[in-house]
Amino acid sequence: MSNQNQLAMLKRDTVDVVAERVKSFQESGELHFPANYSPENAMKSAWLILQNVQDRNKQPALNVCTKDSIANSLLDMVVQGLNPAKKQGYFIVYGNQLTFQRSYFGTMAVTKRVTGAKSIDAAVIYEGDDVDYEMVNGRIVNLTHKQKFGNINKDKIIGAYATIVLSDDTAYHELMTIDELRQAWSKAQFWGKDQTVEKKGSTHDEFKQEMAKKTVINRACKKFLNSSDDSSLVMQHINRADEVREEALVQEEIQQNANVEIIDIEYEDTPEETKQPEEQANQQEQMSFEQTGTGGPGF
């Protein structure tokens, strides 16, 4: 059977099936999309992207992943109202499982959709900035931030905050110190075992301001999503996508370690070897850059 015929059959068993299911959700009133979102266009974009997605062994995702995982990842994407062509998420392969993972942009889009938020913004705090706020019932209120242009220096960042303005014009603020930001970054694979600051020349070093903003925004959005009604179809798929990702990561780690022979001998500790070539490390860091603050690896 030709490759084109195989792709056509796989598309019929995944994309077309998901399209029908989404249509039934809409007809039953379980699912409502934003006016500017087209599930058909999102799935067309996803299908084109999927044909170029590979696993860690450079094997095509459509060859190694199960049909069920492909269909479920597409469904997770569409129900959340996201489009990979707009960089709102990525298809990631773990073993024979395909998962859809929200990006920073996707998390903001979903949060706005679920909570009705008007805007989500963030700012970086530098040494010399004047930041003042009050605490009421454990929440930051009346936050003010005065900054001089001369204070802007990526090597003098002391923190960052995100502000979510809700539909009633109330504002929610999430504040993180530089130590809290680095603690979040340290959960990602690119961060070395004994590393305490950003590696020189890395994404976190070169684009520290943007990294800080994305991390604190993801942290703020995560809190709002976690406090939302889990009964909605959108929230069910948000939670399912996160759970599938965690389970797939665990299963892949188990498989990788299954055939490892343990040799019990005395040895001297040596500095940890680089986990992957520099180019791949930067790509992995960029991926974690998008995901930082959403929980799990890359939190």
Image (cartoon, rainbow, N blue to C red):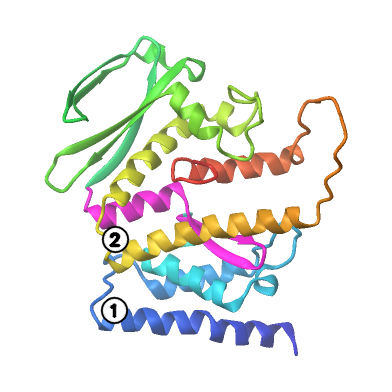
Which segment is the magenta one? Answer: 88-117
Identify which residue, 181 or 148, lies in the foreground: 181
Q: Nearer the viewer, residue 171 or 219?
A: 219
Q: Residues within 10 Å of mark 1 (few under 14, many from 20)?
A: few
Q: Position of residue 225 (x, y in %)?
A: 31, 51
Residue 27 x, y percent position in the rendering: 26, 83
- Image height of 166 relative to 29, above or below: above
For residue 263, side relative to residue 34 (left or right): right
Q: Nearer the viewer, residue 106 or 95?
A: 95
| Magenta region includes residue 176 | no
Percent position of residue 39, x then y: 39, 72
> What amino acid is found at the position of numbered circle 1 in the picture?
Gln
Which amino acid, by three-letter code, is at mark 2? Asp
Seen at 63% across and 30% down, the residue is 202
The residue depicted at 80 percent of the width and 56 percent of the height is 259
> Is residue 102 located in the magenta-colored stretch of the structure?
yes
Write down the residue under mark 2.
Answer: 230
Tell me the SS state at disc 1.
helix
> Is disc 2 placed on a helix, strand or loop?
loop
Real-space CA distance between mark 1 and mark 2, rounded to the nearest whole angstrom: 19 Å
